[in-house]
Image: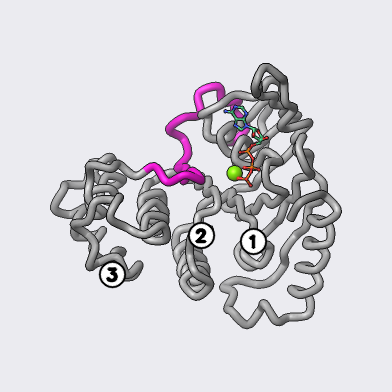
Amino acid sequence: MTITNFEIAIEKVNKNMLFQGQTLEVLQDIDLSIKNQEIVSIIGPSGCGKSTLLNIIAGLDNPDAGAISFQGFNQEERLGSVSYMQQKDLLFPWRTVLENISLSLEIKGISKKDSVEICRKYLSEFQLDKFEKNLPHTLSGGMRQRVAFLRTLLTDSEILLLDEPFGALDALTRRNLYVWFMKLLENNPRTVVLVTHDVEEAIFLSDRIILLSQRPGKVQLTEEVSFERPRTHDIIAHPDFVSLKLRLLDRLNEGGDE
Ligand SMILES: Nc1ncnc2c1ncn2[C@@H]1O[C@H](COP(=O)(O)OP(=O)(O)OP(=O)(O)O)[C@@H](O)[C@H]1O
Ligand SMILES: [Mg+2]
């Protein structure tokens, strides 16, 4: 057990997967320490192991070698310590939009009546208020994603793991949500690990960006993002923003298929 000030420490993590009888090396020597209340984005080519890494941090999977610790304590049992929005939304098909979201509050012991009231406020901010009684299969991909995102945010966990939470949204909705999410984190800071394909999104939201190489995913590049918070849309035209974006896109292209 090592004592550190890091909220999440990932030490020398390796992960292999069996695929059609062959062993695939998915993650190699991942060393990554994430500070309390830091927002870290992970980018990298498709298939490089980003979701696998989040699964491992969440405790849905274990590394073949290496260790994960939270607040310096080795975490064999990590499930339940994080709030995880997986790439594939896992809404309960038999619960309505409102019931899917309010579940996060009911689990905390908040009464059903109060949960519903709190959720309704968010539903209107997310333009989902007309759909509160809908079952998930009757929603568009972007709506389902917003429901899953809200459900993840309404938990009490200090750590949020988000796997492409804005992937199915149009550009305008996405940008509005970035600003909304940032404001939420200003008022209620949490440690966030965000996987995204979108370099602009990574720069806009993060304190630090980690670029993984093609599979086996290794940490290829780490970039600090120093723009002050709260950030507004206009920073995307800032010369430092543009040059960081070009640098990251260049490295992504060197690394493979993006
Ligand atoms: N359960 C599994 N069994 C076997 N192989 C798997 C399993 N899950 C993932 N893989 C393989 O591991 C590699 C990494 O997958 P992963 O889903 O972590 O990639 P990713 O970086 O999240 O990709 P994307 O950007 O497309 O979401 C891929 O080659 C994938 O085929
Ligand atoms: Mg993935």
Disc ID at residue 198: 1
> For the magenta stretch, what is the residue range?
71-90
Residue at 18% across / 57% down in the picture?
133
> Is ligand 1 within 8 Å of the beta carbon of the residue shown at mark 1?
no
- Which residue is the site of mark 3? 124
Q: Which amino acid does label 3 sit on?
A: Ser
Magenta span: helix, strand or loop, mainly? loop
Nearest the viewer among 17 and 27 is: 17
- Spatial CA distance of label 3 from label 1 is 26 Å
Residue at 54% across / 48% down in the picture?
163
The structure's colour scheme is one colour
Q: Is residue 1 visible?
A: no
Disc ID at residue 166: 2
Q: Where is residue 6 in the image (x, y as percent from the top left)?
A: 65, 41
- Spatial CA distance of label 1 from label 2 is 9 Å
Q: Is mark 2 on a helix, strand or loop?
A: loop
The C terminus is located in which quarter? bottom right
Nearest the viewer among 71 and 145 is: 145
Q: What residue type is labelled 2?
A: Phe
Task: Inspect the magenta stretch and tell me whether residue 141 lies in it.
Answer: no
For the residues labelled 2 and 3, say whether their Cβ atoms are less than 8 Å apart.
Answer: no
Q: Could you tell whether 187 is left or right of 43 in the image?
A: left
Ligand 1 lies in quarter:
top right
Instruction: Looking at the image, tell me whether mark 1 or mark 2 is earlier in sequence order.
Output: 2
Q: Is mark 3 on a helix, strand or loop?
A: helix
| Location of residue 205 (image quadrant) | bottom right
Q: Which amino acid does label 1 sit on?
A: Asp
The N terminus is located in which quarter? top right
Q: Is mark 1 on a helix, strand or loop?
A: loop
> Is ligand 2 within 8 Å of the beta carbon of the residue shown at mark 2?
no
